[in-house]
Image: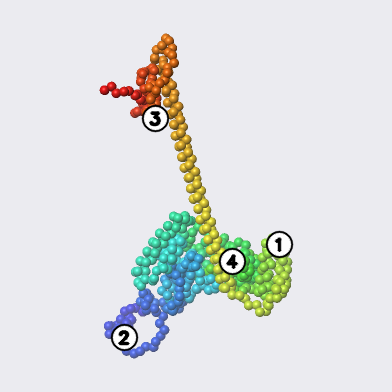
Amino acid sequence: MDLADSPMMMNGHDEEEEIIPTFHKRKRTSTVNYDDAGYGKVMRSSHNDAPVKRSKPGKNVRGVIIGVWRDSDQPDDEDKHVIYGFIDIHDRLRTRIYGMNRRGEEVVGNAPTGAGGCWVTFERVIFDSHLANLSAAEVKEYVKIRSETKPEPTQEERDEADAKAVLKAKAAVAEQEAAFPAGKPVVHRPSLNRQSLSRQSLPRQSLHKTPSFQAVNAADLQTPKTSPFAENKPHGVLLGYWSESDEARIEDKHAVYGVLSETDCFRVKVQRLTRDGRYVDGNFPIGAGALWLSYKKVILEPHLASLSRPEVKEYCRIRQREQENRESDKERRANELKAVQQAKLNVAEKGLDTAADVPASPELEIRHSARSENRVSARHQAEAEAAAERARKEKAEARERQHEKTRKEVAMAEAIIQENAQMELKNNLKKLNKVWVAQQAALTPRASVAPGPVEVVDSEVKYHNGIKYERKQNGPFQGKLVSQAQILSIDGEDYVEYRILTKPSF
């Protein structure tokens, strides 16, 4: 209907009467959030649109908002499930999905269920604009900084605090990398509007297989049925198939394996494989720990259908030991039947009451295992850090010892050089004295008659300040008291110095 033909636009009087009625109208449930900034825009008219969102009572949330869930079925990023980041007791960054949007309105939609379904990895998060280009370490520092501050009352103050926290996080990570150089930083993908509501939009692969979270168009990449990311040989013992698998044929349903942990905890997990080893994706559960199933959701193989849970656990224990050795198909079938009988005998000998068997909660088992793994991981990390610190100290001490040894060797070499120089100088002086005496003897005419022995009296030798003066019998200083010759170097030229004692003539 055109706006000109509307009764609301006939005249000002009619318009005023339409807006302010004179009678009470029946109260109807409103589906409009009048506090929303988008009120007044085009209203949804189709009953196939996203479910109505209502304000949710305040609930205890932990951490700060870092973005929204990429796999949410809401078309608008602002309405998607919100993701909170927080630091756990082991100083690790955890990311969790909440059943609401970032405005606090409840959003159910396709929120994940099951044990561990609320946890989400980085590649499934659409980060806020100020966090989109940060690495994982920088996001962790940002969450630490923002968790320590109180919420700001206005949006402007919030944006300013977010920008400051980003700068502080980058500076903190830069200091850490300077002290302990790390690997290549992680770059998050930008926000992508979902072109398809298909839940399998990206290949589910381990983050350790790629150096970083590369930007991927979720609408273009689909996991093929013969996926290269399919798991290798599964760990555990084949028990049956998943009862909730969406495959039509029983042969194509997801296989379920039983696993016994080191703490003797029995759990069952679903794999992206059929029981004969073919890859199948289908409705494989999404989320951290979602592959661990409740025991009630397992359809056991025919030869295991009559076993109780304790007997199935004992069967897994036996088969895990047998699978360490290679076996043919015939041997495997025979070993499975033997393991069934042996499991029944073992349980009967232990006196377990199979009729009163109550399956333990898989959620509690998963939490227990997670705590054990966290403690082991923390202990290994502490041991690795201590070993690295000891190695650094040993290297520093080795360098200091090497420097001290080098300094001693240099000092010893210098002392030897100086000592050799002094000895060489003395030898040169002796040689020069001999040369001078020979020259004087050659220049002075010899007497025809050899003089008699000369008696040395006290007047022929004088001592003063440790210097010996002798009266020369010949030469240019004949008859004078002269000291030993000393070689001097003046302006680069060598001179011979003599000291002469004479009595004053005045």
- How far apart marks 1 and 3 lie (CA) works out to 108 Å
Disc number at residue 328? 1
* Residue type at numbered disc 4: Arg
Provide the secondary structure element on which disc 2 rests: loop
Vertical side of 109 occupied by 498: above or below: above
Earlier sequence position, callout 2 versus callout 4: 2
Q: Quadrant for the C terminus, please.
A: top left
Foreground label between 2 and 3: 3
Q: Which residue is mark 2?
A: 20
Circle 3 sits on which residue?
Answer: 466
Contact (Cβ within 8 Å) of mark 2 with mark 3: no
User: Viewer-proximal residue, 13 or 91?
Assistant: 91
The Cα–Cα distance between marks 2 and 4, rounded to whole angstroms, is 62 Å
Comparing labels 1 and 3, the label whose residue is closer to the camera: 3
Residue at the disc numbered 4: 272
- Outermost residue on the top side: it is 448
Q: Are marks 2 and 1 in contact (CB under 8 Å)?
A: no
Disc 3 marks a residue whose amino acid type is Gly
Q: Is residue 483 shown left or right of residue 218? A: left
Query: Could you tell which of marks 4 and 1 lies nearer the N-terminus?
Result: 4
Cα separation, mark 3 vs mark 4, equals 105 Å
Q: Amino acid at mark 2?
A: Ile
Q: Report x, y in % for residue 276.
A: 65, 66
Q: Which label sits in the foreground, 3 or 4? A: 3
The residue drawn where x is 32% and y is 82% is 8
How far apart are labels 4 and 1 at the CA level? 24 Å
Image coordinates of residue 96 in percent, x first then y, are: 48, 70
Of pointers 2 and 3, the one earlier in the residue sequence: 2
Give the label, 2 or 1, closer to the camera.
1
Q: Which quarter of the picture shows residue 478? A: top left
